[in-house]
């Protein structure tokens, strides 16, 4: 399995965060890990979080919600799946701690051949201030922890 950090970049002209990372699985396997609620709950977020799926309808027009818990704290997240297709997911993402800050996320799964896939993710937020807040929030460790856990999980599939 790939054990590498994600490349996380802020766009200079638009309030977008770009994330890229490679995995040693097919696009279909990576898509399944993002759309199957049982699998998703096992890898998302920083290590040590317990994730409970509250709602999950991974189809175009569906919605999702989950709560992550650690050390007596709860963090709620919700959104809508706008597009769920073979190698792309377009969804909204809202952290309940800032319910007025909604991101539009696009995930693309690029087939590199030989059982490898590059994930291209982007999150468009409402302002540069919001984007910079996300980047300063510790999201990098959460993203990298989550993807490392995803590597471990994909090794079991």
Image (cartoon, rainbow, N blue to C red):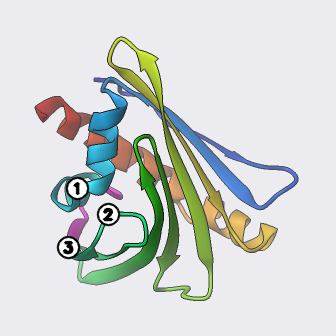
Judged from the image, the secondary structure of the residue bearing numbered disc 3 is strand
- Which one is nearer the viewer's eye here, 119 or 28? 28
Q: Which mark is residue 52?
A: 3
In percent of width and height, residue 27 lies at 37, 32
Name the side, left or right, on which 15 lies relative to 5: right
- Which one is nearer the viewer's eye here, 34 or 149? 34
The residue drawn where x is 26% and y is 52% is 43
Mark in front: 3 vs 1: 1
- Could you tell me which quadrant the N terminus lies in? top left
Marks 3 and 1, the one that precedes in the sequence: 1
The residue drawn where x is 32% and y is 18% is 115
Judged from the image, the secondary structure of the residue bearing numbered disc 1 is loop
Marks 1 and 2, the one that precedes in the sequence: 1
Mark 3 in CB contact with mark 2 (< 8 angstroms): no
> Start and end of the magenta stretch?
44-51
Q: Quadrant of residue 101?
A: bottom right
Q: Which residue lies furthest to the left in this view?
A: 156
- Which one is nearer the viewer's eye here, 8 or 93? 93
Q: Residue 58 carries which label?
A: 2
Q: In which quarter of the image is residue 137?
A: bottom right
- Residue 49 forms part of the magenta stretch: yes
Q: Residue 36 carries which label?
A: 1
- Magenta segment's dominant SS is loop
Judged from the image, the secondary structure of the residue bearing numbered disc 2 is loop
Residue 30's place in the image compared with 104, above or below, is above
Mark 1 in CB contact with mark 2 (< 8 angstroms): yes
């Amino acid at each position: 399995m790939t054990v590498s950090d994600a490349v996380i970049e802020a766009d200079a002209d638009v309030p977008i965060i770009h994330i890229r990372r490679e995995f040693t699985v097919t696009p279909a396997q990576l898509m399944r890990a993002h759309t199957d609620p049982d699998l998703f709950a096992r890898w998302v977020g920083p290590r040590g979080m317990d994730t409970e799926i509250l709602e999950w309808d991974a189809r175009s027009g569906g919605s999702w919600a989950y709560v992550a818990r650690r050390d007596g704290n709860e963090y709620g997240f919700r959104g809508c799946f706008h597009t769920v297709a073979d190698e792309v997911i377009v969804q909204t993402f809202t952290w309940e701690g800032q319910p007025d800050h909604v991101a539009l996320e696009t995930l693309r799964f690029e087939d590199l051949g030989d059982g490898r896939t590059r994930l291209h993710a982007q999150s468009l937020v409402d302002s540069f201030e919001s984007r910079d807040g996300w980047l300063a929030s510790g999201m990098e460790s959460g993203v990298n922890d989550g993807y490392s856990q995803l590597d471990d999980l994909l090794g079991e599939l």
